[in-house]
Amino acid sequence: MSSSVSAGISSSEFDKLCYEFEGALILDDSGDINCDAEASYFGPTSGRLELPVAQDEPEQLVKTPAKPFVRDISMMNAYIVDDSLMQFQDLYLPVQPSPSITPPSLTSRSPAAPTPETLTSDELQSHLVDLYFAWDNPWHNILNEGRFRYAMKHNTKCFSLLLLNSVLAMGSRYSDRIDVRSDPADGNTAGQPYLEVAEKLIQKELHHPRMATVQSLAIMGVLYAAMGRDACGYLHQGMANRLALDMGLNIDPITLTGSQIMSDEDAHCRRQLYWALYCLDKQSAIYTGRVCTMLDSQACVNYPSGPELETSLPNLKEPAFKSHTPLLRALSTLSQMLEKVLLHLYSPRRSNQQPKRIAFFDCSRLAMRTWYYALPAELKVERTGNNNYPAAYMLGMLYHTSVILLAKPFLKALDSTNPTTDNFQANTSSPSPQLSDQEREAMHLKAKVICDEAAREICVLGAKYRKVFGSFRKCPPTANHSILQAALVTLQIHTLADDQANKRGKLSLENYLKTLKELSQSWSPPRRYWSSVSRLVQARLSAATGGASTALPHATEDANATQHGERIPGNEFMAAHEPSYNGDDAEMIQSWIGAFYEEGGFEAYLNSGSGDTADDHHMFMDVLHEMGRESNTTDSSRDNHL
């Protein structure tokens, strides 16, 4: 739910307010809040400031009495520990579990270990664990699959009932089975039984936290946010980050005293978990529009490394699983660049000097393109081929979302004659007298082209993902924010007039709405995004056509429909989304990419400080100018030789 602060004031006044206050206090709209709940802050990168207020949202703020939570014990799909946590059982389970349903495989545990009693079948547990590791963990990369499965089988220190319930809760979101829901008629309650048990288990485990505790909190944080319970998700992620610092995960194991007794597998898992939390922190920051809580300057951890296939433990005949280390390394470096964008362009104390901001923009754009250029083939999604690795599509979407966030502060605000102007958050940059009107206009045009191209690439990635995997039903929640940002920037750039120039924008918006519909089958936020973006599109179409039409060319129906077929003709869609920009600096920047990477410029960019100092930007501009001179000299020599 967005705040309607723009009511009754002009567009320019609203733009000024957005620039000065950089966000809004918005009430949580998860549907289960108290009527006196404190409002939460959401910043410009969240996209929520640009969404209209739903007409029925004030009524949703009225607290309705919660129904008593009663579940047949035969349908209770969760793990419970015995004596140590029985005092909590009356809060969520009215009947004591029957000893007769304790699985035989768990009765052989050591007497010193906790003796869990399970109320779920082995088949269902295996189903949910498989779903989690197939669709969620490759992207978030919180767990080592082989290590987890071995620990679960042999009850080692890497396993806990809390972690298992967290995995089962997240896996439930990717399952179509109704027995994983607390309300069979409500898909958004999938995983709720496991999540409730995890909340009880965490009360004890926080007294003696371990790595499995941090992993559990990280998974729960993602799940709560994806269910629309933003404050709860933010809290759990914050606890995971704090415990990571408590355990020294922000310091590489090789530099710690006493690390000699740590195995290579333990050291690898520490690095993996740190970088997974670091990447989650950046995704949370752009999703909420809040500051980063894990800064690169506060850690010194080597990037994770490992073989293409990982085993549960060495010298044991256990099945091998695909390693997602290359993806985590790529995501980590992208997150480092995203952190710089957030600090330099969106932080409360960012620089307002346009020359510095533009210098940072140019260098960051080059660094991002260098990063993409250096991606291994298995992490790229080419237009002419299919990639069967779902996480590669998420990586591409996050990359193009980062490009949009880099360029969006330099976009113009919408024209005041547009009826949806008041629903858009203006640029995060105020008009600066340090640039001439011509320079400022050129920067606006460059930002417009870059945002448009990035949004188109997200659209193409979405179309290819649907072609390869059928739909977004089993897609990680990161896609929610990427699709929203692409839709909003498309609305900001295209007027949706009935002409050829805006045809691509209409096709893109249809694709975004279709994707949000499919995502809403698993996650709660895209349901609200679909409704809000639909209203924006209808208002824009009505204004562009004089009220004659309020539907896209291939209009989608309601947010609950499920369509896996291709609505947009493939040839028409792909032709409309072919790259079209060949700006003055495009060829020059492309020629710099290889040199920038090989000469250490990319590494220097990642290792630079977070401060917005003149020396930083002068250094990078010197690098760019020197590379430009070398490139021009090389080109001239080659031309003369020919």
Image (tube, rainbow, N blue to C red):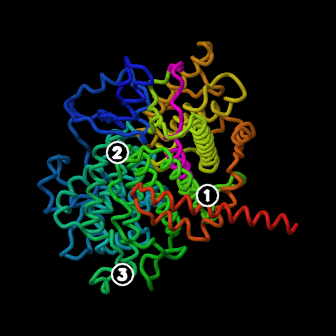
Q: Could you tell me how far apart the alpha carbons at marks 2 and 1 are, in whole angstroms?
A: 41 Å
Q: Could you tell me how far apart the alpha carbons at marks 2 and 3 are, in whole angstroms?
A: 36 Å
State the residue position of label 2: 348
Residue type at mark 3? Ile
Report the span colored magenta: 396-419
Residue type at mark 2? Pro
Looking at the image, residue 305 lies above or below residue 127? below
Looking at the image, residue 421 lies above or below residue 197? above
Q: Residues within 10 Å of mark 1 (few under 14, many from 20)?
A: few
Would you identify the image quadrant in which residue 502 lies? top right
Looking at the image, residue 509 lies above or below residue 95? above
Q: Secondary structure at mark 1?
A: loop
Lower position in the chain sequence, tag 2 or tag 1: 2
Q: Position of residue 564 (x, y in %)?
A: 60, 40
Lower position in the chain sequence, tag 1 or tag 3: 3
State the residue position of label 3: 254
Residue type at mark 1? Asn
Q: Residues within 10 Å of mark 3 (few under 14, many from 20)?
A: few
Indicate which label's residue lies in the foreground, 2 or 3: 2
Q: Position of residue 174 (x, y in %)?
A: 45, 49
Question: Does the CB distance between marks 1 and 3 fall below 8 Å?
Answer: no
State the residue position of label 1: 388
- SS majority, magenta: helix
Does residue 92 appear in the picture of this structure? Answer: yes
Asked whether 572 falls inside the magenta stretch, the response is no
Q: Secondary structure at mark 2?
A: loop
Location of the N terminus by quadrant is top left
